Image (cartoon, rainbow, N blue to C red):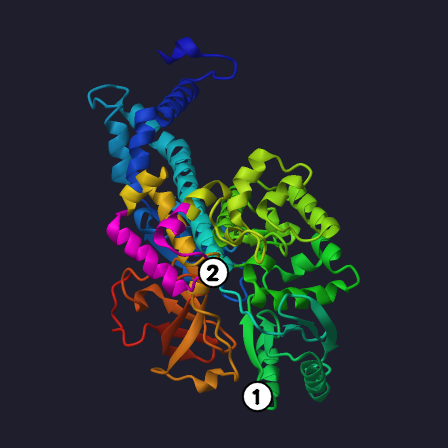
């Protein structure tokens, strides 16, 4: 039979049979049912293995966990998938998928049955094994790993979005003159003082750390600025030299009792400093000092300052640089717009960057609103926005409910009630017998009394409005213009600094959640390193968000590796994994 197929390039029986086996191997490998069955088996029973590439560079042992690693595919966590991918990309790890032989053989045999009596049986078996090892299994490995990566990336984007939401909704710290410190060693610490509205008052550079070690001069500068401008709070960026700067602040506060300090996430401050927006806001200021201004303003209003930065530059995620950047950007932009709209924006003080995230307003229209405000003065009421060039009826309808005008001619303009619902709000106030000038307790009591007489669904029907909308109006009439961020715990203001030597197992502290990841949460407890509250050390079902202020207990302190393990206060060591 083989002789029929002799050609110049295949002159022998062995060559013909080898070619035939190649064709059969490709046919088996490409068969849809075979691929589907093997892929399903690989997702259930396959194992992903990793080992260190001999001679690879991993000085800090970042991937040490994966030097000798094997885990079933269905048990892999998203952060493990992304870590393995990064280690492979950096040529530190060799990663492979292992599918049990019985699984791929049974999948092939179910479609391509071999008759042991046939003279072709051995050739078919050889073709099947060759097709599996050379074509099928590598393709399945690519498919499975691609699926794992897609799932891990979607999860990472979800984690990043949740953390960003927590960071953006941190409550503002009001009533303070803030001195911001952008820490550094060789180039010194950049200092900026801003008033309660974020207006820049003064800047300076101090050199308290090596190599200059001018701590006395630095303390004198802090004392001068504090006395001259009435500083009550010091905000310290959490980057390089942050803890050394924290120690400086603690030393200073011992001399000036009315001042406190707070550690601020400085991620993205350098990106902002060099941005066109920063140049427009602070044109006379050196780029190195703009970061200190951003750090100080982040305490006063985290949302207003952080919206000026590309969300991807705010480091509160999980392998955010490894995921699909377009999908990440879309998800994060959605979070920013959602938070901005939920909190509301004072149209007479907001920056173009903040206004641009309001529904119905883009970057160009935001600039027109600010230009109109600068030229014509503050807006007296919401309807004045219609005089802004380019802001048509549709845009006004979309954005009006998210914009606030405080102290204007229309008291309802300070609330989240949309202008189209003002008539309903006035009817509700009239039926309840109060005005917005009444104290909150009176408004609450009279609205509650009205709802006792007329249930909300009935009242909504009588007023010709939907029940959910009426419930929102009710809430706004009780607390008009209430910032939802004020319902969250305020940042911890500290007066002294801890070190690792101050920690011991069993010590209870209060800390701020800085980042939430798959395996737990990193908590700032006031020492140089954030402590890890592993997910196995807090109760099942507990949800933590960036910015949460929580009580924790020190579980372990590894001084050699500068690591702190935290636990839920009073929790048993064997808490079930959440």
Query: Can you say whether 303 is above or below 151 in the image?
Result: below
Give coordinates of residue 503: x percent, y percent.
42, 84
Give the number of the disc on residue 554: none
Q: Describe the element under mark 2 as helix, strand or loop.
A: loop
Give the quadrant of the C terminus. Answer: bottom left
Residue plotted at (49% across, 78% down):
527
Residue 437's tag is 2
Foreground residue, 12 or 345? 345
Residue farthest along the bottom direction in this orientation:
255
Extreme-right residue of the structure: 284
Q: Is residue 237 above or below residue 406?
A: below
> What span is in magenta?
427-455
Query: Is 576 or 238 nearer to us in this picture?
Result: 238
Which quadrant of the figure has residue 449? bottom left
Please identify the dominant SS of the magenta region: helix
Q: Is residue 543 above or below residue 430?
A: below
Q: Whole-percent x and y of residue 160?
A: 47, 53
The one of 96 and 498 positioned closer to us in this rendering: 498
Q: Give 306 or 441, whichever is nearer the viewer.
A: 441
Per the image, the residue denoted by label 1 is 257
Where residue 311 sits in the image (x, y, percent)? Answer: 56, 52
The answer to whether residue 22 of the structure is visible from this angle is yes
* Vertical arrangement, residue 114 with respect to residue 339, above or below: above
Label 1: which secondary element: loop
């Amino acid at each position: 039979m083989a002789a029929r197929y002799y050609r110049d390039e295949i002159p022998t029986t062995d060559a013909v049979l080898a070619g035939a086996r190649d064709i059969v191997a490709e046919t088996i490998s490409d068969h849809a049912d075979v691929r589907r069955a093997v892929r399903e088996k690989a997702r259930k029973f396959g194992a992903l293995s990793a080992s260190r590439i001999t001679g690879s560079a991993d000085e800090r042992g970042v991937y040490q966990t994966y030097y000798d690693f094997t885990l079933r595919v269905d048990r892999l966590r998203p952060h493990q998938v992304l870590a393995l991918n990064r280690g492979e990309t950096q040529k530190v790890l060799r990663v492979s998928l292992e599918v049990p032989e019985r699984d791929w053989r049974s999948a092939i045999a179910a479609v391509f049955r071999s008759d042991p009596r046939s003279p072709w049986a051995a050739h078919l078996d050889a073709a099947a094994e060759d097709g599996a090892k050379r074509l099928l299994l590598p393709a399945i490995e690519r498919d499975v790993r691609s699926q794992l990566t897609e799932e891990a990336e979607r999860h990472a984007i979800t984690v990043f979005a949740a953390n960003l939401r927590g960071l953006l909704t941190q409550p503002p710290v009001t009533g303070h003159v803030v001195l911001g410190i952008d820490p550094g060693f060789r180039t010194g610490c950049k200092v900026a003082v801003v008033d309660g509205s974020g207006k820049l008052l003064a800047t300076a550079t101090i050199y308290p750390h090596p190599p200059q070690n001018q701590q006395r001069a630095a303390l004198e500068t802090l004392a001068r600025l504090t006395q001259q401008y009435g500083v009550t709070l010091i905000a310290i960026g959490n980057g390089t030299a942050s803890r050394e700067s924290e120690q400086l602040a603690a030393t200073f506060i011992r001399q000036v009792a009315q001042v406190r300090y707070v550690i601020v996430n400085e991620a993205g401050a350098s990106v902002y400093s060099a941005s066109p927006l920063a140049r427009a806001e602070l044109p006379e200021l050196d780029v190195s000092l703009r970061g200190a201004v951003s750090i100080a303003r982040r305490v006063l209003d985290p949302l207003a300052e952080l919206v000026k930065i590309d969300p991807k530059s705010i480091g509160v995620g999980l392998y955010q640089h490894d995921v699909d950047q377009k999908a990440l950007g879309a998800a994060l932009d959605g979070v920013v717009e959602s938070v901005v709209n939920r909190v509301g924006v004072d149209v007479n003080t907001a920056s173009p960057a903040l206004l641009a995230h309001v529904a119905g307003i883009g970057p160009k229209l935001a600039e027109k609103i600010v230009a109109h405000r600068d030229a014509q003065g503050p807006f007296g009421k919401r309807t004045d926005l219609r005089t802004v060039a380019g802001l048509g009826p549709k845009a006004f309808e979309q954005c009006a409910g998210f914009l606030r005008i405080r102290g204007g001619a229309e008291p309802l303009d300070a609330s989240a009630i949309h202008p189209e619902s003002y008539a309903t709000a006035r009817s509700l106030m009239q039926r309840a017998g109060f005005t917005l000038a009444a104290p909150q307790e009176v408004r609450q009591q009279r609205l509650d009394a009205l709802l006792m007489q007329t249930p909300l669904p009935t009242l909504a029907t009588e007023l010709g409005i939907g029940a959910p909308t009426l419930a929102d109006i009710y809430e706004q009439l009780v607390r008009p213009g209430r910032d939802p961020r004020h319902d969250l715990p305020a940042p911890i203001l500290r007066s002294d600094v801890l070190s690792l030597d101050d920690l011991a197992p069993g010590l209870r502290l209060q800390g701020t959640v800085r980042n939430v990841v798959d395996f737990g949460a990193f908590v700032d407890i006031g020492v140089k390193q954030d402590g890890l509250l592993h997910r196995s050390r807090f109760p099942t079902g507990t949800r933590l968000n960036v910015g949460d202020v929580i009580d924790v207990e020190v579980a372990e302190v590894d001084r050699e590796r500068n690591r702190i393990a935290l636990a839920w206060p009073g929790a048993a060591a064997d808490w079930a994994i959440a």
